[in-house]
Image: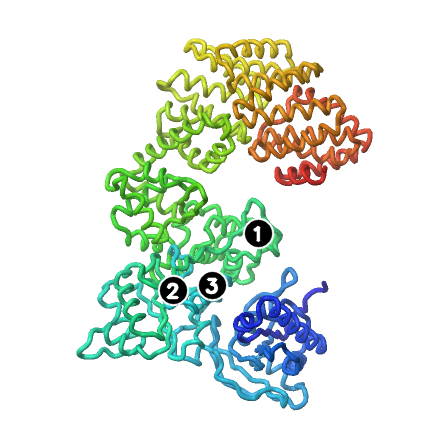
């Protein structure tokens, strides 16, 4: 597509008046046909006058023209064509049009900026069949207007969301309807909606949803945390529905009011209702509004929620034409109320940063960039600052107030410096408009306002919940939040109250509901906790709960429910990390060691090798009285993770200590596990004789252990050893026994390991047709388990199979991906694993087929893949 016209252009914005009613009458299918036909007519008219179509959002149509007079001519031609067209069922498509001249900003094939907003608002003020022109467009067009065309002034009008009034003109032409009702501007109906001094950004879905809710209900409460933009959304909705209320729209600001008894009087004064001498303010208000069709915006009800509820119920019962739009951090809780939770702005994930054009579509980014431009004229988003902007938006949770306060700092700090200071966000995010409410001048004031409205029990639970990371369940909240001031039986109700007051968020699944806080709210809660006497006790309860959780999960990690429990631990991983971090600095050795001993298998399977070793090292270094059995179990984990990372000296030391402890305490299963670990170290080092001796010694304990998890693991290790030695017949026999044992145990991962070995054995024997489905099945199962280290092994197996089948390019990409992913999780392939798969031979085949340079290029492509990209490639491209 050619570049967009630059400089001064004339913008034509159109939309269909009454499109919702038209859709209801025609139905989806016929409406879609009508919509497309209307676009075709507009397109033809614009093309005839040299216009450039830009976009067709919803029922709107946007085009630009190099000459203003051509834009007027195209608008007239379009209205003529629309009027002549035989629409189905005489439905009629009434299109309103707005023209404005300006210099819109262009980026990524689209226009933006205030001139685009102005053309849309001019259009929205008109009626179907009407063409409105701004003064800027009129001054450019009037010298070259089409024949029989004139532009007539219809006065100054305040338009929704625009700072200054606009002098508007109507296009008159013999073929156009001459007379229309008053414009849908802010001046057409009684109201006290002030002009907004900054643009309204985003919220397209929320605007649509709230307006629809107002169509169907009479009391809509916008709820959400402080700073999320409830007031701004309410005022924008009010401006956009103003034309629907003949007796006006009135905004009543209650934030500065402290006496509940004054709520009816404040509303009456705002609406200009005089108090009757022998009636109450509420009674006077009901009587005065009984016959009116009006909308009242009750803004900031949370600190006067009972009084606002009584007022709203009385008004709605007594005034049939009245509707109320309230903003409050908790619902009014009266019959007929519909609660709409205002979400934060959409934010990008800094870890997967999209292209600039896609990044600019996120609401949080749009707001930050626009407000930063006000603070520092000329500020734009580019490749140099895009990552920092995305991080700022993400870390500020997309909260509009926080974003505006951060953007205001762009005049004195770079965006990177702002991000670096966000850990102290309540000190950084100050300096809002002096005319704003005090609680909107700083983020801390906003949070203080919410906190001060809580009861003492709610405050106590709120600050204790700061110890959670990554969300929590009801059971966890009861275990951690109960204590002095907060009885355990009260926690559920208090959670519901904090949720209603927008200080918590909740998300449900079929299995459970999880609660959490926006990070900005959690940081404030943490400050409150740190300043209280609750902190140590709350952290201890948090650690105790998650130690017990991990120990309850551990027995299930190698059984039939292992995937469920691995996922449960994954969900709680941030909380488990928080418990470990606190234990490292404050707790005693025993709880931390118990936690590590219970978690190491999860770290091993899910590929958290480096992290697991770090936690285990910290725990084992703690002095203090600990259970020998717990210490030995932790040593098993430390040894296993060290061996996978190639640190064989550390691994062997851990397993030998563990073996001594298990023998001293008479734990046969522990002895077998330690012997197995020592054997795996020897195998990885290529000492097959020592490995075989230790595996056989462990297997000899099966008479005492029976069918057990460790025996199943030993069998799988003996299989890999046999294949490394080229003993294929022995490997096949052991595979059969391994599958029997591990299926009986329900150990899905061990069965997957055995299946993978079957695939490798088939590959070694040249049975490629048998190997392919086995390897691909194993890869899919490894992915399901979240077994990242196992995924690496199967990517290697699939790559070697492709080399054997003479598809060297795919082989190189798969092997490059396996290498990079193994390095990223700190668990590269060992020389023994390469020997099992006959790695070097198959790579040599690929090198011959592809050539050294081409092989290196394909390998490098594979190394750029993420884990998910490599899996997708492996499971689709290689079929």
Contact flag, marks 1 and 3 (Cβ < 8 Å): no
Residue at label 1?
A: 386
Residue of label 3: 209
Q: Which residue is mark 2?
A: 220
Q: Quadrant of residue 233?
A: bottom left
Left or right: residue 861 versus residue 511 is right
Residue 712 horizontal/vertical position (percent): 55, 19
Q: Secondary structure at mark 2?
A: strand
The mark nearer the N terminus, 1 or 3, is 3
Label 1 vs 2, first from the N-terminus: 2
Of the pair 648 and 771, the residue shown nearer to us: 771
Name the image quarter holding the C terminus.
top right
Q: Mark 2 vs mark 3: which is more N-terminal? A: 3
Above or below, 798 against 402 in this view is above
Pointers 2 and 3 in contact (C-beta within 8 Å): no
Give the side of residue 772 with respect to residue 646, left or right.
right
Does 609 appear above or below 253?
A: above
Q: Is residue 790 left or right of residue 192?
A: right
Residue 435 can be seen, yes or no: no
């Amino acid at each position: 597509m050619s570049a967009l016209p630059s400089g001064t252009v004339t913008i034509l914005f159109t939309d269909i008046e009454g499109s919702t009613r038209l859709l209801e009458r025609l139905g989806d299918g016929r409406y879609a046909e009508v919509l497309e036909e209307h676009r075709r007519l507009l397109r033809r008219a614009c093309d005839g006058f040299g216009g450039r179509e830009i976009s067709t959002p919803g029922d709107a149509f946007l085009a630009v023209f190099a000459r203003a007079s051509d834009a007027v001519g195209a608008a007239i031609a379009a209205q003529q064509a629309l009027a002549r067209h035989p629409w189905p069922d005489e439905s009629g498509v009434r299109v309103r049009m707005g023209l404005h001249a300006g210099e819109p900003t262009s980026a990524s094939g689209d226009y933006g900026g205030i001139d685009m907003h102005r053309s849309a608002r001019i259009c929205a003020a008109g009626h179907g069949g009407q063409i409105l022109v701004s003064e800027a467009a009129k001054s450019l067009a009037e010298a070259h207007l089409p024949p029989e065309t004139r532009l007539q002034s219809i006065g100054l009008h305040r338009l929704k969301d625009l700072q200054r009034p606009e002098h508007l003109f109507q296009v008159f032409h013999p073929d156009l309807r001459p007379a229309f009702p008053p414009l849908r501007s802010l001046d057409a109906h009684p109201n006290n909606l002030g002009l907004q001094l900054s643009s309204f950004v985003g919220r397209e879905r929320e605007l649509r949803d709230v307006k629809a809710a107002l169509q169907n209900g009479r009391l809509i409460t916008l709820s959400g945390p402080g700073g999320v933009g409830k007031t701004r959304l309410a005022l924008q909705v009010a401006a956009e529905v103003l034309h629907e209320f003949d007796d006006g729209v009135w905004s009543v600001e209650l934030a500065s009011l402290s006496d509940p008894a004054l709520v009816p009087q404040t509303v009456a004064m705002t609406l200009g209702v005089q108090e009757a001498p022998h009636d109450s303010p509420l009674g006077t208000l009901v009587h005065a509004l009984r016959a009116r069709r009006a909308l009242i915006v009750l803004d900031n009800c949370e600190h006067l929620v009972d009084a606002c509820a009584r007022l709203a119920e009385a008004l709605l019962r007594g005034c049939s034409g009245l509707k109320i739009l309230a903003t409050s951090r908790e619902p009014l809780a009266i019959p007929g109320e519909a609660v709409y939770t205002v979400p934060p702005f959409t934010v990008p994930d800094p870890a997967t940063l999209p292209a600039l054009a896609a990044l600019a579509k996120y609401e949080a980014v749009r707001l930050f960039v626009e407000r930063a431009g006000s603070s520092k004229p000329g500020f734009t988003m580019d490749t140099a600052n895009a990552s920092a902007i995305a991080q700022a938006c993400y870390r500020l949770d997309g909260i509009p107030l926080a974003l505006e306060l951060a953007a205001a700092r762009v005049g004195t700090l770079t965006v990177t410096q702002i991000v670096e200071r966000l850990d102290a966000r309540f000190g950084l995010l100050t300096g809002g408009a002096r005319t704003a409410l005090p609680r909107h001048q700083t983020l801390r004031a906003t949070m203080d306002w919410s906190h001060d409205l809580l009861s003492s029990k709610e405050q106590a639970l709120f600050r204790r919940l700061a110890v959670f990371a990554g969300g929590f369940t009801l059971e966890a909240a009861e275990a951690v939040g109960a204590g002095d001031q907060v009885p355990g039986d009260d926690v559920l109700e208090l959670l519901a109250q904090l949720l209603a007051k927008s200080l918590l968020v909740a998300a449900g699944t079929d299995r459970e509901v999880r609660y959490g806080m926006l990070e900005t709210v959690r940081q404030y809660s943490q400050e409150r906790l740190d300043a209280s006497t609750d902190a140590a006790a709350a952290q201890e309860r948090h650690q105790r709960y998650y130690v017990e959780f991990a120990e309850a999960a551990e027995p299930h990690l190698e059984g039939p429910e292992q995937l469920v429990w691995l996922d449960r631990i994954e969900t709680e991983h941030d909380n488990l990390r928080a418990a470990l971090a606190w234990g490292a600095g404050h707790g005693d050795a025993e709880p931390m060691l118990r936690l590590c001993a219970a978690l190491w298998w999860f770290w091993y399977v899910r590929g958290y090798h480096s992290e697991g070793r770090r936690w285990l090292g910290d725990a084992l270094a703690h002095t203090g009285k600990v259970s020998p059995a717990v210490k030995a179990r932790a040593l098993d984990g430390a040894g296993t993770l060290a061996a996978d990372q190639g640190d064989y000296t550390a691994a062997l030391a851990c397993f030998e200590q563990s073996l001594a402890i298990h023998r001293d305490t008479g734990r046969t299963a522990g002895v077998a596990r330690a012997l197995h670990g020592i054997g795996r170290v020897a195998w990885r080092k290529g000492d097959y004789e020592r490995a075989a001796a230790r595996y056989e010694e462990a297997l000899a304990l099966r008479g005492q252990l029976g069918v057990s998890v460790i025996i199943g693991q030993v069998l799988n290790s003996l299989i890999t050893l046999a294949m490394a030695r080229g003993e294929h017949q022995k490997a096949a026999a052991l595979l059969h026994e391994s599958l029997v044992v591990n299926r009986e145990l329900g150990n899905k991962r061990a069965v997957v390991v055995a299946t993978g070995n079957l695939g490798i054995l088939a590959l070694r024997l040249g049975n490629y047709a048998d190997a392919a489905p086995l390897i691909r099945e194993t890869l899919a199962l490894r992915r399901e388990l979240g077994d990242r280290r196992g995924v690496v092994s199967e990517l290697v197996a699939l790559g070697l199979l492709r080399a054997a089948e003479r598809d060297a390019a795919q082989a190189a990409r798969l092997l490059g991906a396996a290498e990079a992913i193994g390095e990223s999780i700190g668990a590269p392939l060992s020389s023994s694993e390469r020997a099992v798969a006959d790695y070097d031979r198959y790579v040599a085949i690929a090198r011959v087929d592809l050539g050294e340079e081409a092989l290196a290029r394909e390998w490098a492509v594979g190394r750029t893949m993420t884990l998910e990209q490599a899996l997708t490639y492996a499971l689709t491209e290689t079929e």
